[in-house]
Amino acid sequence: MTIHDLSPWITVPAALLLVTGGLLTLIGSLGLLRLPTFFARMHGPSMGNTLGTGSVLIASVMVASALAQRPVVHELLISLFIVMTSPMTSIMLMKAAVSRQGRG
Amino acid sequence: MTIVFSWAVWFAQLCFVLAMTFAATRLVIGPRAQDRVLALDTLYINAMLSLLMLGIRSSTAVYYDMALVIALFGFVGSVALAKFLLRGEVIEP
């Protein structure tokens, strides 16, 4: 079974999730590029990382389960990992930025 | 309906490549070190998502392992860089 004989009940929600995730990630990275200060720039990639990764990985789980014709959920491991670790990175970077604020 | 799905996969991959371009621009022009660390963090997540798109398009499970390894090592690298910026040292005695 290849990707070309999937049913529309799988491909249309997966396509919607992929477009949503791609647009969210793109908007987050555009925020990283365009926002004025560092503390404003922290916001954009967080949204793109968590929500965009979540929707893309749900689409990936749907397609992989339909291809293998059994539940394949090990892609959710990446999603869980990103959701756990992205706030930790943000907290560490924010603490570093606050402590480096006075220095040139 | 398959054509809709393959166009969606192409569109998502194009979005991730554009996002990688934005993050790389911020990595080059970032005024301070924490901007560059944040740009590296965004860059590896976008690269991981782009690999997942490759995995969907070729319908193999090989790319999943690469994406998991990229996620693991990217997190370790980002936290180590942030810790270095915070304290001037990564592993303190």
Image (spheres, rainbow, N blue to C red):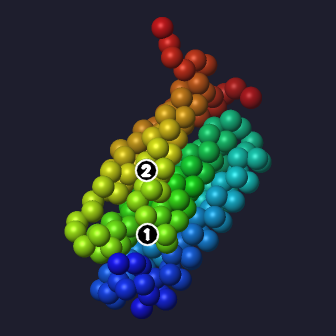
- Figure quadrant of residue A67: bottom left
Tag 2 secondary structure: helix
**Mark 2 and mark 1 residues within 8 Å of each other at the beta carbon:** no
Q: Which residue is mark 1?
A: B59
Q: Amino acid at mark 2?
A: Asp
In the rendered image, which quarter is residue A101 located in? top right
Q: Quadrant of residue A85?
A: top left
The picture places residue A21, in percent across and down from the top left corner, at 46, 69
Q: Is residue A96 visible?
A: no
Q: Within 10 Å of the Cα at label 1, are there few (<14), some (14-19), or many (20+) other Cα atoms?
A: some
Chain bearing tag 1 is B
Seen as rendered, the residue at the extreme bottom is B1
Q: Residue furthest front?
A: A1
What chain does badge 2 belong to?
Answer: B
Specify the farthest residue to the left: A70
Q: Nearer the viewer, residue B19 or A93?
A: B19
Left or right of B47, for residue B68: left
Q: Is residue A101 visible?
A: yes
What residue do we see at 43% from left, 64% from top? B60
Quick check: do tags 2 and 1 share a chain? yes
Q: Secondary structure at mark 1?
A: loop
Percent of width and height locating residue A65:
29, 69
Image x and y of residue B68, in percent: 43, 48
| Residue nearer the viewer, A39 or B61 | B61
Q: Is residue B54 above or below residue A86?
A: below
Q: Residue at x 29, y 75 (%)?
A: A66
> Which residue does the image show at 62% across and 45% down from the upper left?
B40
- Residue carrying label 2: B65
